[in-house]
Every structure is written in structure tokens, then in C-alpha cells.
């Protein structure tokens, strides 16, 4: 299953004062893209409380819990860029928050597709600093998916 990333689910140069606020913002982008019901955001926040979604290189990947699968309409991602970063872990800041909507084990495939870009520190830095939506689309859209 391929995921979708579109211009309407990307927000660059945003501001958030907490990881909860950033998670809500990423979730709202998923809602705007038609990927999830609004109540999915509560599941994203609950997931974050039970287990951090920070994965390193300034990237966090908030997503819902197993109980939230029925709130997902279709598989997709959102990208929230916070130039100044937001504290995610005790001493770690997230600059790129990638919200994930998946109603099955597709999130594993999504992570595999995203891994190459977000595991490379230089690419993660580029995505955290770019002012061009096209750069985000080029690096993070699923292979063989037209935005």
C-alpha cells in the first residue's frame, strides 16, 4: 500500500510550544487531507504519552494506536516543519514532525519508505530548513505516487 503526501498536508515554518501542540498540528493536517477523523488526534496524543515517537535526527513520527485504526479513512502522511524546533525528549528537539495515518500494518511500509530520507542527517536537516514544499514532496513522497 502506498501512502500519499500532498501540498495540503505540508506546513512549513510553523511554530509550536510543545510536542502536544505539534502533534495536534500534524494531526490536523491529516484531517485536512481527508486521511483521518478528527478524533484520531486524541489517539496520536495517547500514543505519545505511552511511548515517544521521536526517532532521531530532529524527526518525530506521531501516529495513532491500534484502537484508532477505524478512524483512518486512507493511508497518508503529513509533514510539519518547525524551524526553531520543539522539545520532544529531555534534551532532543524535533524540527520535522511526520504524522502517519494507517489503518493496517502499512505504517511499517511507510517507515521503510521514509527511512532513507530521515535517517540521513543531511537530508533531515535540508527538510527541516527548506522553504520549498516541492523539496519535501521530492524527498518524502512514496515511490510511484504522483502528488
Image (tube, rainbow, N blue to C red):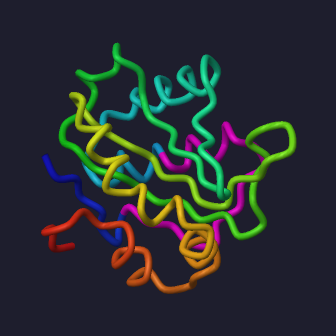
Q: Is 70 in the magenta?
A: no
Residue at 24 percent of width and 29 percent of height:
105
Residue 141, percent from left and from top: 29, 67
Residue occupying the point 50% across, 49% down: 26
Which quadrant of the structure image shows residue 69?
top left
Which residue is at the front of the view, 3 or 20?
A: 3
Q: Position of residue 93 (x, y in %)?
A: 77, 52
67 lies left or right of 89: left
132 vs 18: above or below: below
Task: Say which of 53 and 68 sits in front.
Answer: 53
Task: Report the quarter where the C terminus lies.
Answer: bottom left
Q: Quadrant of residue 55?
A: top right
Q: Is residue 4 left or right of residue 39?
A: left
Q: Number of marks in the image?
A: 0
**x%, y% of residue 56?**
65, 50
Give the residue drawn at x 61%, y 75%: 122
The quarter holding residue 67 reads top left
13 part of magenta stretch: yes
Looking at the picture, does residue 81 appear above or below residue 136? above
In this rendering, would 27 be left or right of 146?
Answer: right
Q: Which residues are magenta?
A: 9-26
Residue furthest right as drawn:
91
Query: Does 90 appear above or below 15?
Result: above
- Residue at 33% across / 49% down in the picture? 112
Where residue 14 appears, as percent x and y from the top left, is: 64, 66
Work out whether 8 lies above or below 32: below
In this rendered view, identify the residue nearer to me: 7 or 103.
103
Amino acid at each position: 500500500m502506498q501512502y500519499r503526501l500532498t501540498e495540503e498536508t505540508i506546513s512549513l515554518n510553523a511554530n509550536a510550544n510543545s510536542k502536544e501542540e505539534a502533534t495536534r498540528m500534524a494531526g490536523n493536517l491529516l484531517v485536512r487531507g481527508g486521511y483521518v477523523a478528527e478524533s484520531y488526534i486524541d489517539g496520536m496524543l495517547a500514543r505519545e504519552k505511552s511511548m515517544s515517537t521521536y526517532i532521531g535526527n530532529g524527526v518525530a513520527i506521531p501516529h495513532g494506536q491500534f484502537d484508532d485504526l477505524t478512524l483512518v479513512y486512507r493511508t497518508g502522511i503529513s509533514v510539519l516543519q518547525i524551524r526553531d524546533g520543539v522539545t520532544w525528549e529531555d534534551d532532543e528537539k524535533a524540527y520535522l514532525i511526520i504524522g502517519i495515518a494507517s489503518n493496517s500494518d502499512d505504517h511499517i511500509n511507510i517507515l521503510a519508505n521514509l527511512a532513507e530520507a530521515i535517517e540521513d542527517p543531511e537530508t533531515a536537516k535540508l527538510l527541516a530548513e527548506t522553504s520549498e514544499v516541492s523539496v519535501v514532496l521530492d524527498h518524502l513522497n512514496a515511490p510511484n505516487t504522483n502528488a
